[in-house]
Amino acid sequence: MADFQQNGNIAQFHDLRTRPLEELEYRLETFAQTRKISLILPSLYSELEGDALPHILAELAKVKYLHRVIIGLDQADAAQFRHAREFFSQLPQNHVVIWNDGPRVQQVMERLEPLGLGPIEPGKGRNVWGCIGYLIACQDSAVMAIHDCDIVTYERGMLSRLVYPVAHPAMPYHLSKGFYPRIGSNRMGGRVTRNLVSPLLISLKKVIGDRDYIDYLRAFRYPLSGEFAMRTASLPDLRMPSDWGLEIGVLSEAWRNLGPRAVCQVEIADRYDHKHQDLSPEDAQTGLNRMSMDICKAIFRKLAADGTVFSVNTFRTLRATYYRRALDMLEVYSHDAMMNGLDFDRHSEERSIAMFAENIFEAGQVFLENPQELPFIPNWNLVHAADPDFLTDFRAAVAADHAD
């Protein structure tokens, strides 16, 4: 993917294979002396039992510029939390495991409901939000990075390239988004980006006309990547979706709060593979079925907030336009896979497109029936205004869990 191409909407930085990783890390160690860098790892307990996370920790143990690692642990009981603390103890950096299902953390979180700021749906969005709150409470980091815990092809250079643009004092970027080719088990991955988001954005532009926001999203080579870094000064204002629209929601918040000149994307890997979600066509609450609905609603909500007027006929036309465009693009993807010797299940890909087409229309209907639905987690400025002691008590709850 080494090239010089710029799309004119956001800055994009390529891996031209001209700089050794050791030199990049040395520069980050220099920056970190005055701009501390922290990493957030949202994790399910089940990921501790997989093959990816032990390798990720072995790579992170070599990273000297990291000031702190914050692990958000979901779906763990007391024994599993104790095991998680031992599991992550191999990290040489200052680190903490937040037991999201623990009684102390739950008790603090319950204070949000009487304030009209809860309940918050469990999931990756809440996990990341809690870790960000803990980081804000620490008040000692200038840069925050996030990546998933199921990356099979992880190398520590991914993190170095991701944080470099926002850690560099001479660069103006407040958000850095990672991109890469999704290739795993000799097949082309990234079905939701390839078969839903890309053709949907093209179709939206055709149906509703030019929108700066659509051009902005289209500028990202992999808008659904879970790897991004931000300057921590932007975190208290960040509104995060609690559903599968997390990645699109973060990009939308950067568009609203920062503007495209403060956003960049970085090529962080030649190859990337992680856990694949099932299509789940029979269950609208799981897998790519649920994910596609949430992503569509997130995009529709943002366009409506920017003044776009939607109707049932708009979504009917959008479904038809998307379906034709997605099938045309599928032909190109199949040829790309053929040229590179990758397996390509044409039938499965077409099934996903048919499901996504129906979900585009259904998501549109849900939006029209309940346009005030706001599945956002309250930003930390709002939480602090409603309960000034919340972050202090939250941090104390985490510390008490570790003291047991």
Image (tube, rainbow, N blue to C red):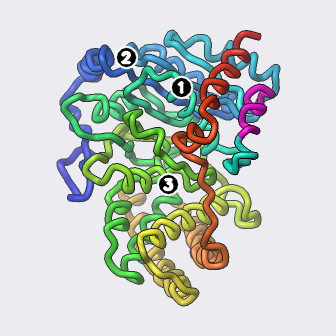
Mark 1 residue element:
helix
Which mark is nearer the camera, 3 or 2?
Answer: 3
Extreme bottom residue here? 313
Mark 3: give few (<14), some (14-19) or many (20+) Cα within 10 Å.
many
> Which residue is pictured at 24% across the width and 19% down the height?
27
In screen coordinates, is 401 left or right of 320?
right
Q: Is residue 102 magenta?
A: yes
Q: Is residue 127 visible?
A: yes
The residue that disc 1 covers is 137
Q: Residue at x 32, y 59 (%)?
A: 219
Q: Nearer the viewer, residue 347 or 177?
A: 177
In primary-sequence order, the first of circles 3 and 2 is 2
Q: Which residues are magenta?
A: 101-111
Q: CA distance from mark 3 to mark 2?
A: 29 Å
Residue 190 located within the stretch drawn in magenta:
no
Residue at 38 percent of width and 29 percent of height: 143
Disc 3 secondary structure class: helix
